[in-house]
Image (cartoon, coloured by chain):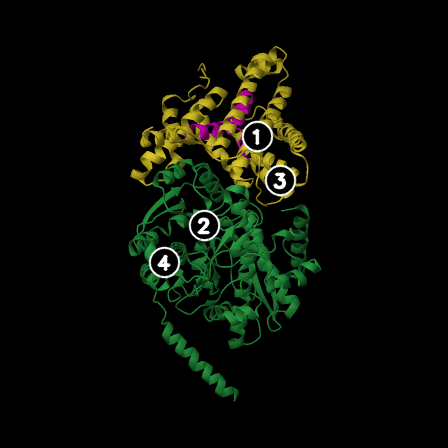
Amino acid sequence: MPRSTSIRALLAGAALLALGAGASADEQYFPLQSYRVGPYAAGGTGFFGGFIDYLNLVNSRDGGVNGVKLTWSEGETQYEVERGVEVYERLKSRPGIAAWNPLSVGIAYAMIDRITADKVPLITINHGRTDSTDGRVFPFVFPLLLNPYSETSGIVEYLATREGGLDKLKGKTIAVLYHGSPYGKETIPIYELLSKKYGFKVEQIEVPHPGNEQQSQWLTIRRLRPDYVVLRGWGVMNPVALKTAQKTGFPANRIVGNVWSNSEEDVIPAADAAKGYVAITTQASGAQYPVIQEIVRTVYDKGAGNLSDKKRIGSVYHNLGVLNGILNVEAVRIAQAKFGHRTLTGDEVRWGFEHLRLDEARVEALGAKGLFHSINVTCANHEGEGRVTFQQWDGTQWKVVSDWIKPDWASLRPIIEASSTAYAKERGLTPRDCAAEEQADIQSGKRASVDGK
Amino acid sequence: MNPELSFFVEVVVGGLLSGVMYALVAIGFVLIYKTSGVLNFAQGAMVLFAALTFVSLVEWGLPFPAALIATLAVMVVVGLAVERAVLRPLVNQPPITLFMATLGVAYVIEGAAQLVWGTQVHGLDLGIDDTPLEFGGVLVSRFDLFAAAVAGLMVALLTLFFRYTRTGLAFRAVADDPLAALSIGLRLPRIWSAVWIASGIVALVAGLLWGARLGVQFSLSLVVLKALPVLVLGGFDSIAGAIVAGLIVGAAEKLAEVYLGPFIGGGIEGWIAYVAALALLLIRPSGLLGQRSVERA
């Protein structure tokens, strides 16, 4: 963190302490388990910077959500689970907590029991436990937009479009280079499943953490001569993969990165070796979208922007943070429509997330057309049918090279339900009856409407 | 050449060249250990700090040679500061105290690096094209060949330094017997300062080469994980041992990953080198070329 930013952070912290830092009656509070130092600080500063920029935009432009001011404070985790839990314990008693957004699989796993007991939503946008998609078993966890299984299906669908159709995948070979961690291994059965379904051959190759040496893996790939390599990486593993691919003569445009291999931080260190590399994303990068332009005008031009380097506005992590801000704020807005324009409880915000339905028209009204497609969260589906697109690195920036693609959710849902059912059985949980809850919502909506008349 | 044989040669050559890169980091450890008996856990952090300083200066617009000289100066200051502020006051403390002190220094340097230069990831282009060269169907990385040449040159310079210069001979005397060296009038503090400076310079060379390979980012400090089995195998106090062990570790882990990996699940190269190092420890605790210590009871 540059010195000026550190000083600003200290002053902000002191100011928060002086003010008591809690949410008053008309405030909704976001505790942020951010990581601005340590090995993953580049992603952390971008994501949390984008999130805070959007909250700032809503406060400055609209005076908050229907008059309820948005507040937040940060606790540094350095992406470490024990620090993340410590920040949770420290901040959880603040009033008016809307949701937790740790952007860390490890911290999220460690929080599931805690947030369920405390009845506050846990948002794991584009990551987290795949089976937490099943809201019947995980009522407070929301892997919004994309879980790892949908990501896998989205990548296979994209490769099919490059080949001219799903039937053309038959006989092709796809190598999956995955990070040697639970995160990296999570999609192994899904690639196996899809390879059987579509008739392609899959070879899955592990790269030990942290992935700073991959000569043997890429030599194995060279011997296999696959049609495509899917990169399921994290951190330093990504640029090293691209560089080693170049060393072993594998073309970058035949490598497709997953959602944690898709940022500027993954390609810039690889320099020319990354030219032509393609990666999946749920949100396009670039600063041309109206909402990002509004953030520039309303927040940065007034000196209140969170990123110390303005060149990072519109980068992958910054836009992911902005999108996360949009989803959190809209969930609060939707919940307010039911419960009133006031500080909501965590459980009320959960209801908002479970009714987070933003169609293309609403996305356009939010100034995010092209930034992301849509979302349709329900009681049973906490992922929300996010669409994916693919971007190609041209050496200086990402360029969108595909339409918005729908993963094959129908094929994946039974596997998700099998896993969530096993979890429920192991924990002695009774899954919620979502149909009954939705019916009750409809009835209460009708009653409210009659009372209003 | 038979395709299988050609593939085998490619795996071995790739492994040997990777091993040279591991040895490059290990040499920084050896220099400090050889003269002061301290296992400097901060070597990885120094590699990160050197690379981050250099790349930031280049991005500020300094020409390559000027940035190199400025970074060299910074690393000299860092080396001296660590020796003066941390190690010298702890002289005669048990080895574990000194090790823990360097562990603390590692965290301080990593934190300072991010505080001063920021947290962004940087690319580092040393102007070496990394398209592979082909020799009879075997692909060899140009960059790795260049890195091996630089490492070889550095080892040659260090060997000449230790054999033929007054300071180098003093280093060896201190390494052999610090008390005897002190009794003949060698100034230990001056030698320790010099060796920390040398270690800073080695960190700069390693930082530039590893930085060009991985990108300049926080995980550069993790390259020490690759150097540790090399140190155990080669001996903590032998530069030649570091090179030999680097080559062995590099080739062995690649061969194991490619030929054993498919049978035992893959991803084994992260720990296979440690298996070899532990096995050797049981047979030869001082490593392949490390000095055997003989103590009277």
CB under 8 Å between discs 1 and 4:
no
Which residue is disc 3 drawn over?
B112
x, y percentage for residue B297?
A: 44, 15
The residue indicated by pointer 1 is B203
The answer to whether residue B210 is magenta is no
The mark lying in front, picked from 2 and 1, is 2
Q: Is residue B226 above or below residue A330?
A: above
Tag 4–tag 2 contact (CB < 8 Å): no
The x and y percentages for residue A144 are 46, 62
Alpha carbons under labels 1 and 4: distance apart: 51 Å
Whole-percent x, y for residue B79 in the image? 62, 29
Q: Residues within 10 Å of mark 1 (few under 14, many from 20)?
A: many
Q: How far, Cα to Cα, is label 1 from label 3?
A: 16 Å
The CA distance from mark 4 to mark 2 is 20 Å
Q: For the residue labelled by badge 4, is the local secondary structure a helix, a strand or a loop?
A: loop
Q: Chain of mark 1?
A: B
User: Which of the marked residues, 1 or 3, is nearer the chain's N terminus?
Assistant: 3
Asked whether disc 1 touches disc 3, contact meaning CB atoms under 8 Å apart, the reply is no
Residue at screen point 51% across, 77% down = A338
* Label 2 Cα neighbours within 10 Å, binned few <14 / some 14-19 / many ≥20: many
Judge from the rendering whether residue A190 lies leftward or rightward of residue B117; answer left or right: left
Q: Which residue is mark 2?
A: A257
Could you tell me if the residues under marks 2 and 1 are in contact, i.e. CB atoms within 8 Å? no
Q: Amino acid at mark 2?
A: Gly
Q: Main secondary structure of the magenta part?
A: helix
Q: Amino acid at mark 3?
A: Ala
Q: Position of residue A57 (x, y in %)?
A: 63, 64
Q: Which portion, as a residue range, is magenta?
A: B15-44
Q: Which mark is residue A165?
A: 4
- Rendering colour (chain A): green
